Image: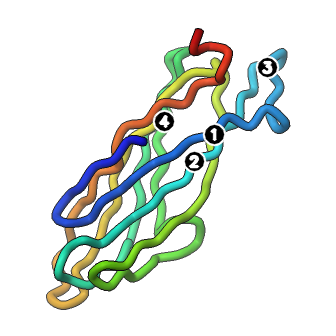
Amino acid sequence: MPTTTTQGVTVTVTTNYLPDYSSPSQEHFVFAYRIDIRNNSSHTVKLLRRHWFIFDANGTVREVEGEGVVGRQPVLEPGESHQYMSGCNLKSGMGKMQGTYLMERLGNGDNFQVNIPEFTLMVPYRMN
């Protein structure tokens, strides 16, 4: 599981290929990913925004930005974590994602970026 820690905030990613929602003959491959954000710092933090880069093996790059994650801007006290599920579709069946979260330290209002580790999206039969 890809994991990275930035300024005391740890992000871990798990991925799954969703064959029931995919149609390989139509170049449509759907993946789910689960993100675990854990606040290991001594500050209360709030997730403000997300910024993703989605790379498809066919050469396509998509950029996604927006407020919060899946409609929420979670606040994490020291030691707390937040998990969410989201998804992505690719045309080639192979790709990767990476990005950042914009976080705010609620005690002093400082903003900082937390890295989301790069992770691979790959249909299982392509691994052989």
Q: Is residue 84 left or right of residue 19?
A: left
Helix, strand or loop status at disc 4: strand
Q: Give the residue at mark 1.
A: 16
Q: Is residue 21 left or right of residue 15?
A: right
Q: Give the residue at mark 2.
A: 33
Q: Residues at badges 2 and 1 in contact (C-beta under 8 Å)?
A: yes
Q: Earlier in the sequence, mark 1 or mark 3?
A: 1
**Residue under the point 45% across and 48% down:** 13
Helix, strand or loop status at disc 3: helix
**Residue under the point 82% across and 19% down:** 26
Q: Earlier in the sequence, mark 2 or mark 1?
A: 1
Residue placed most toward the observer, 115 or 68: 115
**Label 1 environment density (alpha carbons within 10 Å; few <14, some 14–19, many ≥20):** some
Q: Earlier in the sequence, mark 2 or mark 3?
A: 3
Q: Nearer the viewer, mark 2 or mark 3?
A: 2
**Label 2 environment density (alpha carbons within 10 Å; few <14, some 14–19, many ≥20):** some
Amino acid at pointer 1 = Asn
Q: Earlier in the sequence, mark 4 or mark 2?
A: 2
Amino acid at pointer 2 = Tyr
**Residue under the point 39% across and 64% down:** 37
Q: How is the image coloured?
A: rainbow
Amino acid at pointer 3 = Pro
The percent coordinates of residue 4 (x first, y second) are 28, 49
Q: Nearer the viewer, mark 4 or mark 1?
A: 1
Q: Quadrant of residue 47?
A: bottom left
Amino acid at pointer 4 = Ile
Q: Give the residue at mark 3.
A: 24
The percent coordinates of residue 27 (x first, y second) are 75, 19
Q: Please give the label number shown on residue 105.
A: none
Q: Residues at badges 4 and 1 in contact (C-beta under 8 Å)?
A: no
Q: Earlier in the sequence, mark 3 or mark 4?
A: 3
